[in-house]
Amino acid sequence: MDSSLRSDDSRSRRLSAGYAEAWRAANPGGVVTYRDLAADPLPHLDGTAFAAGITPEDARDEAQRAAWALTAQVAGEVRDADVIVLGMGLYNFGVPSTVKAWVDRIVAPGITVGEDGSGLLGGRTLVLALASGGGYAPGTPRHGWDHREPWLRHAFEFLGLTDVVTASAELTLARESPAMIPLDLGDAEDASFAAAQEALAAHARGTVAGAA
Ligand SMILES: Cc1cc2nc3c(=O)[nH]c(=O)nc-3n(C[C@H](O)[C@H](O)[C@H](O)COP(=O)(O)O)c2cc1C
């Protein structure tokens, strides 16, 4: 899955595509399902869609049935995957809003959440292929400002998924941002991207699964 609003210049799209390529090579018979949250954004969860999730199937009205069909499709994709690969940039220190809309959809009673409230996504792996304009590593002034992974870890742990793999291409604005150019970071951007790319490929090569 991708969520970058950019296309050719997107680092996270390159990272997620690299993961998929390596995974396909390691899993020739595997099935890959692709969703582009930027090109085809999901509607925000509204009252009808939320009500559909907590209304028994035979009691849903027509609008709720339509809303549930989309929820079931999107949540079903996640349930049916062994590995969920999510490419995204850092937008205002958090996930793109399209990713939030996706998460609100996949918290789906009967599909990803059991009757007793337990998460049903145990055994799956979430791979985060991240890009950010700045740097947020330990020791940097804005360490802790990147809220993507911490939030996603909690959201997915609620759904029973605890295996989260993260690779991040940082400093992608090092040569573009007027605030960053004077820092003269040299090839730090390229080194960060290459390290993330290699880490993801190594993980994908080691993953033998049925669906991603
Ligand atoms: C709307 C928007 C908000 C952004 N906010 C941040 C930010 O808070 N911190 C940051 O380091 N970079 C920020 N960036 C830069 C992106 O994270 C960076 O360009 C990244 O490479 C985007 O991912 P992509 O290369 O896959 O498109 C922002 C970019 C956009 C378009």
Image (cartoon, rainbow, N blue to C red):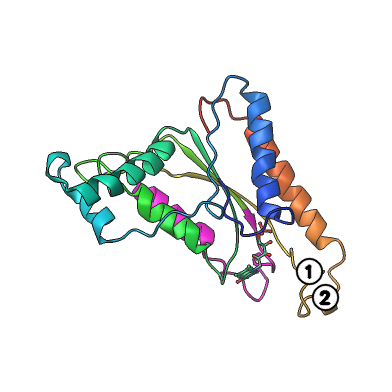
Can you give x and y, in whole percent of width and height, for residue 1 in the image? Answer: 55, 45
Residue 141 magenta-highlighted: yes
Q: Is residue 115 left or right of residue 159?
A: left
Label 1: state its secondary structure: loop
Dot 1 alpha-carbon crowd within 10 angstroms: few under 14, some 14 to 19, many 20 or more? many
First in sequence, mark 1 or 2: give its number. Answer: 1
In the figure, 45 relative to 75: above or below?
A: below
Can you give x and y, in whole percent of width and height, for residue 137 in the image? Answer: 66, 64
Quick check: can you spot residue 146?
yes
Q: Which residue is mark 2?
A: 181
Task: Establish whether ligand 1 lies closer than 8 Å to the Cβ of label 1.
Answer: no
- Residue 22 lies in what quarter of the image? top right
- Residue at horizontal 33%, vertical 39%? 120
- The stretch in magenta equals 130-159
- Residue at horizontal 73%, vertical 65%? 171
Residue extending furthest toward the top: 29
Residue 64 magenta-highlighted: no
Quick check: can you spot residue 53?
no
Can you give x and y, in whole percent of width and height, for residue 30 in the image? Answer: 56, 24
Q: How many marks?
A: 2
Ligand 1 placement by image quarter: bottom right
Dot 2 alpha-carbon crowd within 10 angstroms: few under 14, some 14 to 19, many 20 or more? few
Can you give x and y, in whole percent of width and height, for residue 115 in the image? Answer: 19, 41
Q: Is residue 194 left or right of residue 21?
A: right
Q: Which residue is mark 1?
A: 174
Q: Is residue 120 left or right of residue 94?
A: left
Is disc 1 in contact with disc 2, using a CB cutoff of under 8 Å?
Answer: yes
Amino acid at the residue labelled 2: Ile
- Residue at horizontal 58%, vertical 67%? 91
Compute the Cα span from label 1 to label 2. 6 Å
Amino acid at the residue labelled 1: Ala
